[in-house]
Amino acid sequence: MRVRGPGTTRPRRPLLAGTLLAVLSLLLASPSSAADTPPRGSAHMGMGVVPHDGRHGTPVPGRAAQTEGVDVSSHQGDVAWSTLWNSGVRWAYVKATEGTYYTNPYFSRQYSGSYGVGMIRGSYHFATPDTTGGAAQADYFVDHGGGWSRDGRTLPGALDIEWNPYGAACYGRTPSAMVAWIGDFLNRYRARTGRDAVIYTATSWWKQCTGNYGGFGASNPLWIARYATAVGELPAGWGYQTMWQYTSTGPTVGDHNRFNGALDRVQALALG
């Protein structure tokens, strides 16, 4: 038997190992916020809808004429456009840009692919009001696929303004500052293209982050996001929606939308 002399202590390895295991367990159980934040450039239409507004069913068939559409980004990669066309999809929006730092690497193939099967298509910009100004982002959008031409097949560009996937929901802006940012984007887009951009948003975000501002409804078409049986309440300033994103789990690409009108109304929006 080994006898410890005066002043000796027990080895601390078991205690140290136990402490390390406890710390490791806490780290694994509580992932850091940085690990939960997606990489810049990965945002896409509607990514905040389910976490904030949830899902509440699918649309109820009605008598009003509606035209099916889709929206895509780099997440869909090469899209089966012929499959979508054969299922009744007649229009599409493709993510072109985000902030002033990202362009969709699949944009050209997706944009031309939808056009090639006969669809009326447009492009959208994912707004990041915490990185650069609205006018700068509008310029970046127009310079990288967000332009418009009066060919009857090109829809006006869309501003995707919704929950911030990279941080605070309202991008650190007050409602008045957010309204000013959106206004700067819309004004520059109109100056560059001659068209009023479509605004894609969700009513709950719009209320929270713009104070339910109603000043854009007279000129900018509304594309509302709500995954439910009906469109529900609209943001202030709009009496109706032009487009409705009603699901992120539709066939082939996930995001499916309904244009509020028959195909000739889609063509009318494209012609301006």
Image (cartoon, helix red, strand yellow):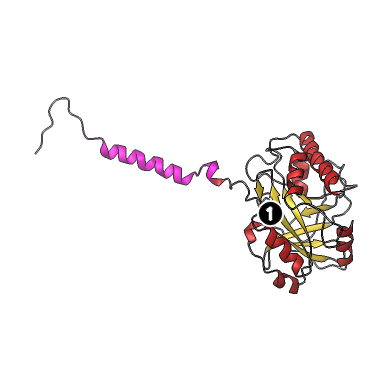
Picture residue at 65% right of the left edge, 39% below the top: 168
The residue depicted at 58 percent of the width and 45 percent of the height is 37
The secondary structure that dominates the magenta segment is helix
Left or right of 92, for residue 36: left
Q: Residue 206, position in %: x, y?
A: 77, 44
> Residue 10, image x and y in percent?
21, 33
Q: Residue at x 72, y 35 (%)?
A: 173
Q: Is residue 17 magenta?
A: yes
Side (left or right) of 203 relative to 40: right
Q: Which residues are magenta?
A: 10-35
Identify which residue is drawn at 85% across, 44% down.
Answer: 191
Q: Quadrant of residue 262?
A: bottom right
User: As displayed, is residue 67 above or below residue 233?
Assistant: below
Assess whether residue 168 is covered by the magenta stretch: no
Circle 1: residue type: Gly
Q: Quadrant of the N terminus?
A: top left
